[in-house]
Image (tube, helix red, strand yellow):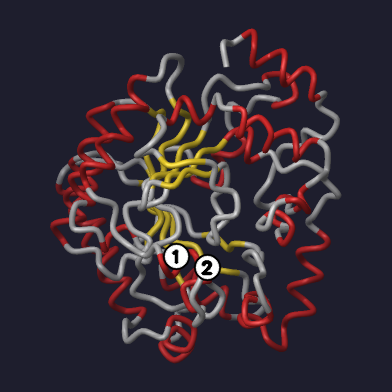
């Protein structure tokens, strides 16, 4: 299988040549917005009440089925990727295995993946991942060191338990003669020897082990300076790293390629907007295709092209679109008129 980190360089289209898309390349469906970790670099650790904390829940199975049915009925090529994860820990939803089975049977995406801390990865879930052919499992690792892991996650889960869960998954995968799921443990850059300890610890259970670059979630107040909370004394190094691997883009391309469906049914063109400022509708009231082809979606895309991100409460406080690590496409200068005419031509 293609290593996870190489997927972004495989069979890529130049967005400037294919916009507007008749349907998104990537759809994220959130099995759960709950999490059993409260990581210091994540909005799950925020103490105040906000849109996210008020909407924490597991997605009901009937809503998930509705989402899959709508995606299956949407004409055109398959999605490039269906991601069964978003802002929470997907394995907290008791229906996760059934969701995976339904998604696989629908055959509506080139690949299916999820991201998990795997602390709740039981042998039963592991076997379902193999039998229902989850393509990629990205594993969020927070530290190979027990004390540091506890400080970051505020949980009693030990790194050794996470390693053991992955070992069992590998064992089941081998027993069933499968290469899926491809297992990719990842950890945020530590700028120290912790990187090497992480790589060594998971070398025998991961198919690809890699280091993620720092980024900060949307900053809603001083408490939400997530990069500062995580890196502390190493913050200047992390900020310099982000700056050196950033581009002065104007438009965020995510709105042109991505659709995210929250556990409560809210739909957004963004996968990091935990506060809901980019929500453009709800799948319980409007079909996914109608939302993609709506005036609201077009106006949001237009706002990006015209450098008016300050008009949106979430986009105004976001800079991840500048990161070369997380964002590969540059659509600055794409004519709004071409976007409008292209939508008419494709029936949007």
Q: Is residue 168 left or right of residue 210?
A: left
Are the residues at dot 2 and dot 1 in contact (C-beta closer than 8 Å)? Answer: yes
Q: Is residue 34 left or right of residue 14?
A: left
x, y percent for residue 176? 16, 44
Q: Residue at x 20, y 49 (%)?
A: 97
The one nearer the camera, 142 or 203, is: 142
Q: Is residue 172 above or below residue 289?
A: below
Residue found at the very far top of the displayed protein = 345
Q: Residue at x 51, y 38 (%)?
A: 259
Q: Quadrant of the C terminus?
A: top right
Circle 2 residues within 10 Å: few <14, some 14–19, many ≥20: many
x, y percent for residue 125? 19, 56
**Residue linked to disc 2:** 187
Q: Quadrant of the N terminus?
A: top left
Q: Residue at x 67, y 19 (%)?
A: 18
The one nearer the camera, 219 or 287, is: 287
Q: Residue at x 24, y 63 (%)?
A: 121
**Residue linked to disc 1:** 140
């Amino acid at each position: 299988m293609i290593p996870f980190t190489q997927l972004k360089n495989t069979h890529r289209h130049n967005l400037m040549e294919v916009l507007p898309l008749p349907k998104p390349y990537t759809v994220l469906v959130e099995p759960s917005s709950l999490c059993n970790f409260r990581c210091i670099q994540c909005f799950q650790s925020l103490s105040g009440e906000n849109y996210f904390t008020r909407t924490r829940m597991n997605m009901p199975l009937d809503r998930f089925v509705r989402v899959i049915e709508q995606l299956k009925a949407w004409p055109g090529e398959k999605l490039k990727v269906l991601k069964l994860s978003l802002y929470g820990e997907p394995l907290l939803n008791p229906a996760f295995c059934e969701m995976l089975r339904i998604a696989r049977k629908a055959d509506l995406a080139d690949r299916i993946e999820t991201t998990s801390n795997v602390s709740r990865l039981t042998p039963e879930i592991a076997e379902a991942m193999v039998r229902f052919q989850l393509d990629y499992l990205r594993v969020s690792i927070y530290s190979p060191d027990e004390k540091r892991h506890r400080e970051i996650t505020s949980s009693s889960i030990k790194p050794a338990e996470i390693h053991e869960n992955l070992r069992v998954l590998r064992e089941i995968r081998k027993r069933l003669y499968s290469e899926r799921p491809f297992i990719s443990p990842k950890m945020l850059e530590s700028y120290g020897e912790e990187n090497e300890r992480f790589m060594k610890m998971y070398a025998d259970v991961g198919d690809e082990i890699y280091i993620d670059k720092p980024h900060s979630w949307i900053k809603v107040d001083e408490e939400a300076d997530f990069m500062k909370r995580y890196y502390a004394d190493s913050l200047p190094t992390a900020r310099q790293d982000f700056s050196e691997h950033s581009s002065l883009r104007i438009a965020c391309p995510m709105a042109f390629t991505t659709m995210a469906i929250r556990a409560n049914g809210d739909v957004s063109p963004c996968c990091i907007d935990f506060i809901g400022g980019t929500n453009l509708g709800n799948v319980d009231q409007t079909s996914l295709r109608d939302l993609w082809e709506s005036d609201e979606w077009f106006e949001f895309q237009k706002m990006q092209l015209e450098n008016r991100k300050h008009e949106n409460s979430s986009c105004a406080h976001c800079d991840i679109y500048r990161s070369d690590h997380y964002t590969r496409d540059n659509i600055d200068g794409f004519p709004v008129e071409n976007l409008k005419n292209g939508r008419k031509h494709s029936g949007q």
